[in-house]
Image: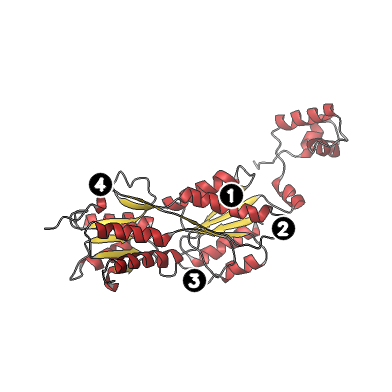
Amino acid sequence: MKFEAVTIKDIAKALGVSTSTVSRALRDSYEISPETKQMVIECAERLNYRPNPIAQSLKEKRTRSIGVVVCEIANNFFSQIINGIESIAYDKGYNVIISQSHESYEREIMDLQYLTSRSVDGLLISLSTETSDVSHLKALNEKGLPIVLFDRVSSEINAPSVVIDNFKGAYEATEHLIFNGYRRIAAISNSEFLSISNERIAGYKQALENYGIAVDPQLIKHCFYGGMIYSEIEEAVNELMVLKQKPDAVFTASDKLTTGCLKTIKRRGLRVPEEIAIIGFSNTEIAELIEPHLSVIRQPALEMGQSAIQLLLQQIESKRPITQIEKRVLSPELILGASSLPRKLS
């Protein structure tokens, strides 16, 4: 049996009045008496009437819906960002439509086509690892679709953005390892196409250079899909472990890389931190439950989501074009666990 929503016609039929009377009553028109309005409202509630959002959007020329594109909802970092987005969007009367690119450029384009075909009022997006060409986003931006980029951004798009101070987070993590006596520090990062990868590797390199440690290219590994495929993390760690001069510590540049690296190290039978230390970007809630407790660079994901939706709603609801493009940079927090304790010299 096909579901059919209650309409104004159903209310009019139940009350024996015209549809125009019901419509005016629901709009609180002065032309309708208070008694009739009350009668219509009570009937609407009894029949579980809800206004047709499509009809409303045609009238208002807006859908009150926001499109969100992330690489993977299962990623703790992105799920926390979505919570931040929804915490503000729903309070402001907007629905959120979430799509996953699964790190695919083609999937990202398909997601955008779907969202724009639904006439979303604005778009929040974190680029996929395969996205080096952003012409599809530039085209939407130039047509006037409000867009805000977050986390993974592109300088080629003239739109507001919200990012983490990736350089600072990576620098402080590497510096912490140096202070604790580690010198052969490896780095495992996401795709070189991503802005976050370049910024985090830059912070890692700068810390080494500032403390007189030569940057060894052999110790830097990139996982194109950022750990979404476990085998690429396993391969990166195994390549590091067969080096003549093995690393004594590893810095990992994303959530899945951090937990995946620890998993691989343990599978190899290595003790953390006695034989190799680890610290990395991670927002997983189980960091303190893993043995040993992980040292992490925690990103303010909820705040990132809230900042992104605030910037987007400013564009959507502004009566004048916004000419100043705002970039918000949020600070990560270094949280120390047992996985990066001071090195014990033999």
Sort mark 1 into few (<14), some (14-19) or many (20+) by Cα contacts within 10 Å: some
Q: Mark 2 or mark 4, which has the lower sequence index?
A: 4
Figure check: 92 above or below 28 = below
Q: CA distance from mark 3 to mark 4?
A: 38 Å
Figure check: 296 above or below 3 = below
Q: Nearer the viewer, residue 297 or 1?
A: 297
Q: Which residue, as the protein is rendered here, is positioned at the far top? A: 35
Check whether the beta carbons of the residues at disc 1 and disc 4 lie within 8 A of each other. no
**Residue with the mark numbered 1:** 96
Residue at 83% x, 26% y: name it: 35
**Residue with the mark numbered 4:** 291
**Residue with the mark numbered 2:** 320
Q: Residue 124: name its quadrant.
A: bottom right
Q: CA distance from mark 3 to mark 1?
A: 26 Å
Q: Residue 175: name its quadrant.
A: bottom left
**Residue with the mark numbered 3:** 132
Q: CA distance from mark 3 to mark 2?
A: 32 Å
Residue at 69% x, 54% y: name it: 318
Q: CA distance from mark 2 to mark 1?
A: 24 Å
Residue 343 visible in this rendered orientation of the protein: yes
Which is closer to the viewer, label 2 or label 1? Answer: 2
Q: Mark 1 or mark 4, which has the lower sequence index?
A: 1
Q: What amino acid does circle 1 point to?
A: Val
Q: What amino acid does circle 3 point to?
A: Ser
Assign a secondary structure to mark 3: loop
Quadrant (top left, top right, bottom left, bottom right) of the C terminus: bottom left
Q: Residue 226: name its quadrant.
A: bottom left
